[in-house]
Amino acid sequence: MPLATPALDALRDALSDDFKDTRLNLGSVLAGENLTDSQAFGAALAAARFLRAPKLAAVLVSDIHAGLGAGAAALISDAEAAAGLMAMNTVYYRSRHMLGKESYAARPARLRMQRIAKPLTDPIHFELMSLACAALAGCEFCLQSHEAKLVAGGTSEEACHDGIRIAAVIAAAAVGLE
């Protein structure tokens, strides 16, 4: 049974008619077509935090707590960590890529990123959260890297696609809530 989303439903219903498509997409994209509820909502929360959309993040946290019980704290913590790390990584790697010089590509990042290797949930959840944030940042290197790790770990391209769709709809919802 899909995760109940009373807080998100109320927020979605408050979006103006100009955001009718966003309301409909927000209602369907988290339904877990190729992702589990925790994967879908983890990606959504990471995206909302990455976008600095506190109202949207708060309703997602509320529904995650209500629907996932004991697993909620780890999922929320990983979503927060993924959003923060990807805020740093997408700036760094996108800039390095745009400079296009071998000299920058050869330099080590020397940025601490240990949480990626030791998530509280599991590597697939964390990579999906990271993929959603990379999509929002438009960081080609990060998108390719996180998608490759997911596929190598047994995640389907369809599931990766769903993670990106979730990020896109969360971005639209954040605009609608401004």
Image (cartoon, rainbow, N blue to C red):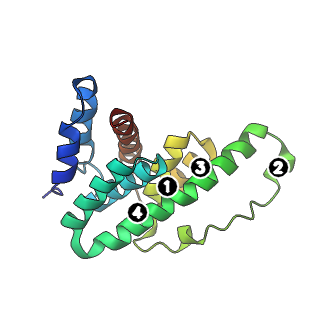
Calculate the distance from the C-alpha at mark 2 to the C-alpha at mark 1.
Answer: 23 Å
Earlier in the chain: of badge 2 and badge 3, it is 2
- Asked if labels 1 and 4 touch by Cβ distance under 8 angstroms, the answer is no
Query: Which of the numbered marks, if any, corresponds to residue 104?
Result: 2
Earlier in the chain: of badge 2 and badge 1, it is 2
**Label 1 belongs to which residue?**
130
Calculate the distance from the C-alpha at mark 3 to the C-alpha at mark 1.
Answer: 8 Å
**Label 4 belongs to which residue?**
125
- Asked if labels 1 and 3 touch by Cβ distance under 8 angstroms, the answer is yes
Tell me the kind of residue under disc 4: His
- Asked if labels 1 and 2 touch by Cβ distance under 8 angstroms, the answer is no
Calculate the distance from the C-alpha at mark 2 to the C-alpha at mark 4.
Answer: 30 Å
User: Of helix, strand and loop, which one carries label 3?
Assistant: helix
Calculate the distance from the C-alpha at mark 2 to the C-alpha at mark 3.
Answer: 16 Å
Q: Quadrant of the N terminus?
A: bottom left
Q: Residues within 10 Å of mark 1 (few under 14, many from 20)?
A: many
Specify whether 121 is left or right of 135.
left
Residue sitting at 42 percent across and 49 percent down? 47
Earlier in the chain: of badge 2 and badge 4, it is 2
Residue sitting at 66 percent across and 68 percent down? 112
Residue at the far right: name it.
103
Tell me the kind of residue under disc 2: Tyr
Earlier in the chain: of badge 4 and badge 1, it is 4
**Label 3 belongs to which residue?**
142
Between residue 137 and residue 152, name the one nearer to us. Answer: 137
User: Which picture quadrant has residue 3?
Assistant: bottom left
Specify whether 159 is left or right of 23.
right
Residue sitting at 29 percent across and 73 percent down? 71
Residue 107 visible from this viewpoint: yes
